[in-house]
Image (spheres, coloured by chain):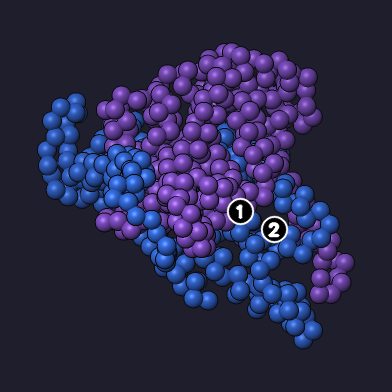
Amino acid sequence: MEKRVVFRSSWLPYLLVAPQIAITVVFFFWPAFQAIHWSFLIQDAFGNSSQFVWFQNFQDLIRDEAYLDSFKVTAVFSTLVTFIGLAVALVLAVAADKVIKGAMAYKTLLIWPYAVASAVAGVLFAFLFAPSVGIVSFALRAMGVDWNWVLRGDQAMLLVVIASVWKQISYNFLFFLAGLQSIPKSLIEAAAIDGATPVRRFWTIVFPLLSPTTFFLLVVNIVHAFFDTFGVIDATTQGGPAGATQILVYKVYYDGVKAADLGSSSAQSVILMVIVIALTVVQFRFIERKVQY
Amino acid sequence: MVENRPVLVFLRHAVLLAGVACVAFPLWVTFVASTLTLEQILTVPMPLVPGDQFWANYSQVLTAGSTRGAAAPVGQMMANSLVMALAIALGKIAISLVSAFAIVYFRFPLRNFFFWMIFVTLMLPVEVRIIPTFKVVSDLGILNSYLGLTLPLIASATATFLFRQFFMTIPDELAEAARIDGAGPMRFFWDVVVPLSKTSMAALFVIQFIYGWNQYLWPLLITTDESMYTVVIGIKRMIVGGDALTEWNLVMATAMLALLPPAAVVILMQKWFVKGLVETEK
């Protein structure tokens, strides 16, 4: 896409892009290159000297049990957050799609969690599920569940998944609702006249036509689970117990800031960048494909 | 509705009400806890109707903070969050607007190069480059300052794309007419482009205000001085570890204060919010 009518100036456009380019270079490119550079170095404990070690940091990571565990934890966590979040939001959107009475009120009441910071969502759920004082823990104990996420890894995972899903549902809901409302009514009416039940109409017409939205949300939710959930984890489990909820981003932070292992943390950053780039490419190829519809 | 099935209508409302209840339950418990004394919360199970400590708890956190965790007043933190959210939202809009204008309305060497430079930043979220970015900010000497809190988060590929996309839809005749009337590019920018972009700006403002207000990792790294904490960081610092030690009534009052401004923005500006959400992601 190009404009036919343009203005001419030898200096003005440079002045106009300068602020953005300057910030991009100083706070994006320079740090990214530093991360790549540091990922090839090993520093001594005092940060006085460093040695160029080629790919040793990466090799160490591949052999590191804790890092491989973190990969597994991230895979489990992002799969659960993505699928539960999408499924719940889809059910709500399908229910909201044809509601006439109170449609606006339902929508408003369902979208506000988008405004809640991940860390605040984490604090809310940490309180609800607090082993000794939490009200949900009380109900769980009354039902005979031995609830203590501070000690039990699977329950800690469940807690961070619930908090992250709670925060993400509003986003998925809005996009599914928009997708549902763009499906032509005539298709559904035709199927109804042919005698298809609502359930059958959903699976043979609505769900396939919704697939572009679903795929888009799938990528966005994976990215969300990878990066935006840092606040949830830090406010609740802090990666524990025993690394059971230590997702990759949390490990980069922990190793770099708390353990001050720059080389390893930078190598992990580089691996994460590769993952983000792959996800972004997938997302954009999909969008290109959708334009041809 | 294609056909009339009362059972289905009932089911829809039941599902929606259950959804609303699940979404609202944490908020209700938070609100109730913020109106109780700590002793009331520690009697398990805590009551689910509001108590009478509303003013006591909220004035305590706003003016003094918690007594066991961070003791900074939340009022100051709210002000910090507001400055940060406004600076990020307005800063992003300003620099993206001018750079998109340059990229759409001028032909100049390196134009595509600059465009790709901005594009690539989409792929580098703060979370993956925290430590080197921290080092840059520390070398510049802007730790514990509003500049350090906001500047690294201001560059935004999404906002630039949104404006570029929008500028492409402005009819060429407007630029032609402006040129014939002898208006320069900046005159055209101020008198035509900016007024036409108001809708996009409003939508973007809502999304970026929430983004700025809710930042967590970045302020956590660069603010060590209590007077620079944002409210989201402040809550975290009030939790001292150990269920019974934390002053949950004050933490929950702070949580309410932290989530109300962005929630109000979403609910009051719902139309812009939905528009902004859909446009910035596509």
Side of B47 relative to B212 (left or right): right
**B51 and B45: which is toward the camera:** B51
Q: Residue furthest front?
A: B181
> What color was chain A assigned in the picture?
blue
Image coords of residue B44 (percent x, y)? 70, 27
Identify the subunit bearing mark 2: A
Q: Label 1 sits on what residue type?
A: Lys
Image coords of residue B92 (percent x, y)? 46, 42
Residue identifier under label 1:
B275
- Could you say which disc has been placed on residue A156 in the image? none
**A149 and B182: which is toward the camera:** B182
**Residue visible at 39% across and 23% down?**
B144
As drawn, the chain in purple is B
CA gap between label 2 and label 1 equals 20 Å
Image coords of residue B23 (percent x, y)? 68, 45
**Residue visible at 82% across and 66% down?**
B8
Image coords of residue A292 (percent x, y)? 49, 76
**B37 and B115: which is toward the camera:** B115
Query: Mark 1: few, some, or many residues within 10 Å (few <14, many ≥20)?
Result: some
Residue identifier under label 2:
A92
